[in-house]
């Protein structure tokens, strides 16, 4: 199946009786909100966390050593976020998103101000699908939509 939208992803998860959980930073719950805009989403969305701060990523289980070594804005942190949220919610898929949407972070200066890291964890196969993108739009909302579109593309790689 080729997914073209988050709606097609959600509908497929419903049919397959698979669940998803998200831990989002820069997208601020946009992915979870987009999922809940689709009829039947309550059957598949197990949990969502918005973890803007390092403190709350760590409280949700992200290893502080990963943040210290690679920075909060890294593929390694996104990967740990996706696994930890899947474990926490006991969901089939976990999504971790971290990065910056064209805005500097005074508390975490590492990393480019326009790069986002996304990880999709598939619990059944213990497999990660990872990607990153440079956001190019002029508004936060448009950049969040770019991240959502990238996640839809990533679901096309799930076996």
Image (spheres, rainbow, N blue to C red):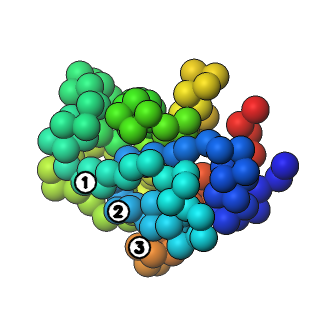
Give left or right: position of 155 versus 120: right
Visible residue check, residue 25: yes
Q: Which residue is mark 3?
A: 140
For image coordinates 61% across by 25% down, the residue present is 124
- Residue 7 in which image quadrant: bottom right
Give left or right: position of 54 versus 91: left
Toward the right, the furthest residue is 1
Q: Is tag 1's residue or tag 3's residue first in the polypeptide sequence?
A: 1
Visible residue check, residue 67: no
Q: Is tag 2's residue or tag 3's residue first in the polypeptide sequence?
A: 2
Q: Which residue is mark 1?
A: 52
Front-lying residue, 101 or 35: 35
Q: Which residue is mark 2?
A: 28
Q: Position of residue 6 (x, y in %)?
A: 64, 62
Q: Position of residue 48 (x, y in %)?
A: 37, 52
Front-lying residue, 150 or 138: 150
Front-lying residue, 98 or 23: 23
Q: Regarding mark 1 in the picture, which secondary structure is present there? A: loop
């Amino acid at each position: 199946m080729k997914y073209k939208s988050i709606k097609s992803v959600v509908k497929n998860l419903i049919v397959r009786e698979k669940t998803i959980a998200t831990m989002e930073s820069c997208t601020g719950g946009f992915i979870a909100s987009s999922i809940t805009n689709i009829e039947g989403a309550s059957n598949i969305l197990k949990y969502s966390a918005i973890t803007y701060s390092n403190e709350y990523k760590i409280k949700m289980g992200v290893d502080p050593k990963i943040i210290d070594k690679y920075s909060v804005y890294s593929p390694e942190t996104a990967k740990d976020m996706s696994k930890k949220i899947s474990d926490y919610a006991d969901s089939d898929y976990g999504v971790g998103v971290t990065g910056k949407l064209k805005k500097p972070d005074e508390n975490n200066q590492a990393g480019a101000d326009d790069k986002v890291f996304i990880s999709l964890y598939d619990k059944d196969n213990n497999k990660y699908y990872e990607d990153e993108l440079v956001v190019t739009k002029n508004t936060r909302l448009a950049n969040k939509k770019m991240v959502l579109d990238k996640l839809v593309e990533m679901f096309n790689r799930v076996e």
